[in-house]
Image (cartoon, rainbow, N blue to C red):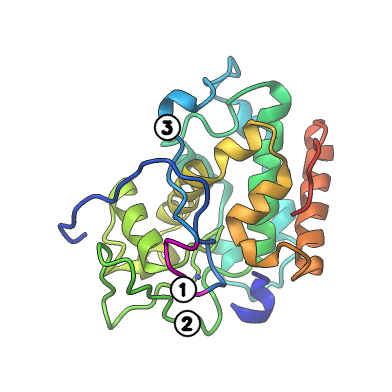
C-alpha cells in the first residue's frame, strides 16, 4: 500500500500452522471466507533450504550505513521514520532470524535482501511512515482465535506495515509481545517493529524468493491487492526499487518480477 497516500497475549490456542497454498494479503482487502481463500501457513521446516555458508556478517556487509541511510535520505525531514528506523535496529532484530539473507545461493541471498528493502521502501515511503495514516480497525471477526480488543486498531505498522488482528496475534506469540492488546508497540519500539516485519517475511515470504518463484510472488504475499493489473503503478514502483537494490548488491534480479 502506498503509505504516502493512505497511511495495516492472551492465552489462546496456538493457530494451526499446517501448510496450505494461499493466504489473505498483508493488508488492503477485507477478509473473505477461508473456504474461498485458505490462509497460507508457514512452510514446513523440512521444505526450507539450508542456511548457506555465507558468514554472519554477510547481510551487514550489503546493508551498509550508506545503503540504509540512502533510503531514509529520500524522505522529508519531518518524517518520524527517519529517526525511528535505523540500521542498528534492523541488525539487532536480524539476530533472531539467522536464515534471512543467508539461505540458498549467493544470488538467492542477495535477492532476498534486495526484495525485503524494496518492499519496506515502498510500504513506508523511504522509511518515512511508522504507522498507517488514518488507519482502519482491520479486525477480522472470522478469526475467532484472535479476538480483537475493541479499543485497539490493527492497521499497518513497521517496515512492512503489519496489518490485521490475526497477524498481530501470531507475531506477538512468536516474538514476545501482546499483539492483540498492545499493537501500538510496533510504532514505539524500533527493534520489535523490525522483528515483527522480519517475522512476517520469514513466515510467508522468505521461501518464495529463495525458491526461485521471483519477486512477483513476494508482491502477492505482501499486498496481493496490487496484483492482476489492479494497481500497476504500485507494482512497478516495487519492481524499480528491487531492480535498483539488486544492481547495488551485484546480483541478477531473476525472472517473474511482476504479479
> What residue range appears in magenta?
30-36
Image vertical order of residue 58 relative to residue 114, above or below: above
Q: Element under label 1? A: loop
Split into 4 quadrants, where in the image is the N terminus?
bottom right
Q: Do tag 1 and tag 2 residues touch (Cβ < 8 Å)?
A: yes
Split into 4 quadrants, where in the image is the C terminus?
bottom right
Instruction: Give the residue displayed 68% in from the left and 58% down from the top.
Output: 121
The quadrant where residue 223 appears: bottom right
Q: Does the rendering let one see residue 81?
A: yes
Please rate how many residues cluster around mark 3, counting C-alpha atoms within 10 Å: few if below 14, some from 14 to 19, many from 20.
few
Q: Which residue is identified by label 3?
A: 44
Image vertical order of residue 174 relative to residue 139, above or below: above
Q: Nearer the viewer, mark 2 or mark 3?
A: 3
Instruction: Give whichever of discs 1 and 2 has the lower sequence position.
Output: 2
Please rate how many residues cluster around mark 1, counting C-alpha atoms within 10 Å: few if below 14, some from 14 to 19, many from 20.
many
The quadrant where residue 249 appears: top right
Residue 32 falls inside the magenta stretch: yes
Instruction: Give the residue displayed 18% in from the left and 61% down from the top.
Output: 10
Residue 250: image location, x then y, percent: 82, 31
Instruction: Give the residue displayed 51% in from the left and 29% down from the top.
Output: 99
Camera-nearest residue between 207 and 98: 207
Q: Element under label 2? A: loop
Q: Do tag 3 and tag 1 residues touch (Cβ < 8 Å)?
A: no
Camera-nearest residue between 176 and 39: 39
Instruction: Find residue 136 and name its label.
Output: 2
Instruction: Find residue 155 and name its label.
Output: 1
Amino acid at each position: 500500500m502506498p503509505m504516502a497516500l493512505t497511511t495495516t497475549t492472551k492465552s489462546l490456542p496456538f493457530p494451526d500452522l499446517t501448510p496450505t497454498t494461499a493466504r489473505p494479503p498483508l493488508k488492503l482487502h477485507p477478509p473473505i471466507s477461508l473456504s474461498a481463500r485458505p490462509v497460507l501457513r508457514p512452510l514446513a521446516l523440512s521444505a526450507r533450504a539450508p542456511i548457506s555458508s555465507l558468514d554472519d556478517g554477510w547481510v551487514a556487509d550489503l546493508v551498509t550505513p550508506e545503503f540504509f541511510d540512502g533510503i531514509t535520505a529520500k524522505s522529508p525531514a519531518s518524517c518520524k521514520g527517519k529517526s525511528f528506523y535505523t540500521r542498528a535496529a534492523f541488525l539487532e532484530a536480524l539476530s533472531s532470524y539467522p536464515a534471512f539473507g543467508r539461505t540458498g545461493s549467493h544470488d538467492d541471498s542477495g535477492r532476498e535482501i534486495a526484495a525485503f528493502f524494496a518492499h519496506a521502501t515502498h510500504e513506508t515511503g523511504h522509511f518515512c511512515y511508522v504507522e498507517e495514516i488514518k488507519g482502519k480497525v482491520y479486525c477480522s471477526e472470522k478469526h475467532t482465535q484472535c479476538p480483537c480488543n475493541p479499543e485497539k486498531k490493527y492497521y499497518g505498522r513497521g517496515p512492512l506495515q503489519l496489518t490485521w488482528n490475526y497477524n498481530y496475534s501470531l507475531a506477538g506469540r512468536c516474538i514476545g509481545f501482546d499483539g492483540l492488546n498492545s499493537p501500538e508497540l510496533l510504532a514505539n519500539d524500533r527493534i520489535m517493529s523490525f522483528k515483527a516485519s522480519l517475522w512476517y517475511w520469514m513466515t510467508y515470504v522468505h521461501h518464495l524468493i529463495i525458491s526461485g518463484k521471483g519477486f512477483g510472488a513476494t508482491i502477492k504475499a505482501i499486498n496481493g491487492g496490487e496484483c492482476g493489473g489492479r494497481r500497476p503503478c504500485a507494482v512497478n514502483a516495487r519492481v524499480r526499487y528491487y531492480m535498483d537494490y539488486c544492481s547495488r548488491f551485484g546480483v541478477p534480479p531473476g525472472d517473474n518480477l511482476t504479479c
